[in-house]
Image: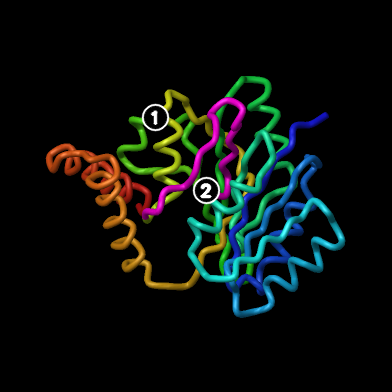
Amino acid sequence: MEPLVSIITPAYKAEKYIESCIDSVVAQSYRNWELIIVDDCSPDNTAEVVKQRSDEDTRIKLISLEKNQGVVNARNTALDYASGQFIAFLDSDDLWLPEKLSVQINAMLENGWAMTYSSYSIIDEEGKDLAKTIEAPVSTTYRNLFRGSNIGCLTVVINREITGDFKMPHIHHEDYATWLDILKRGYVAYGIQESLAKYRKATGSLSGNKLKAASWQWNILREYLKFGVFKSTYYFVHYALNGIKKSL
C-alpha cells in the first residue's frame, strides 16, 4: 500500500480559492493522502466550504481555530494532527498538478531521499498563467541555504520516517527556517525539475515585498543562525546578487 501523505494547508479568508486548492488535491493520481485544513478563525465562509467538502471526502479534515493565531500556528497545529509518513505543504490559494505527489513520492522511495521539492509556475489572482517558472535547483544542502532559499513551500515533501518530527519556528520566513532546521541534521534536499505546482501571486507592491523579504533574510542570518556581522553580510550579498540575477 502507498504510504500516507499528510498535506498541511493553513487557511484564512480563503473562501475564494479554497475549493480550487482542494480540487487539485482530489485530482492527484496518488490516492493515499489526508488533507488537513486549519481554518485560522476566518471571518468569511472558509470553514463552511471546507466542511461541505470534508463531508463528501473523509480524507479532507477540517480543524477550526477559535482565535486567529497566524500561519505558523496553523501549520504546526496541522503537524500535530498529521499521521502520515510524508508531509507536504499547500497553501489555500495555490494548486498542484495531478502527478505532483506520485512523481515526488516515487522518487523519494526509490532513492531514499528525506526531502524533495520541485519547479513551479506562477499564476495571477484569477488563475491565469503568467508564463514564468521557478526552476528547482538540482539539490540543496544546509550550507547552500545560507545564500537564501529557492525552495517553494508549496512543492516540498518531507519523509518524517527519515528526518523525525519537526515544527515551524515563530519567525518570518518560517518555511525557510524549517528547511534550515531539517537540512542541518545532515540531509540533502533534492529538486524535481518538472513543474508540479502553481503559485498564485497576489497583487501588491513588488518593491515593498522585496524589501520585506530582504529584511527577513537578514534576520534569519543574524538572529536565527546567529551569524556575526561579517558572515551575515557575506551571505546577504550573495542573496542580493542571486535576486538581481533572477530579475534579469
Q: Is residue 227 left or right of residue 141?
A: left
Q: Quadrant of the N terminus?
A: top right
Q: Position of residue 20 (x, y in %)?
A: 71, 63
Tell me the magenta residue range. Answer: 153-171
Task: State the SS at label 1.
Answer: loop
Measured as percent of width and height from the top left, residue 153 is found at: 52, 48
Q: Is residue 130 left or right of residue 7?
A: left
Label 2 secondary element: helix
x%, y% of residue 222?
A: 22, 46
Q: Residues within 10 Å of mark 2 (few under 14, many from 20)?
A: some
Where 118 sits versus 202, above or below? above
State the mark number for residue 134: none
The one nearer the camera, 67 or 48, is 67
Q: Say which residue label 1 marks.
A: 184
Q: Which x, y percent locates residue 111?
A: 62, 20
- Identify the residue under disc 2: 153
Q: Residue furthest top?
A: 111
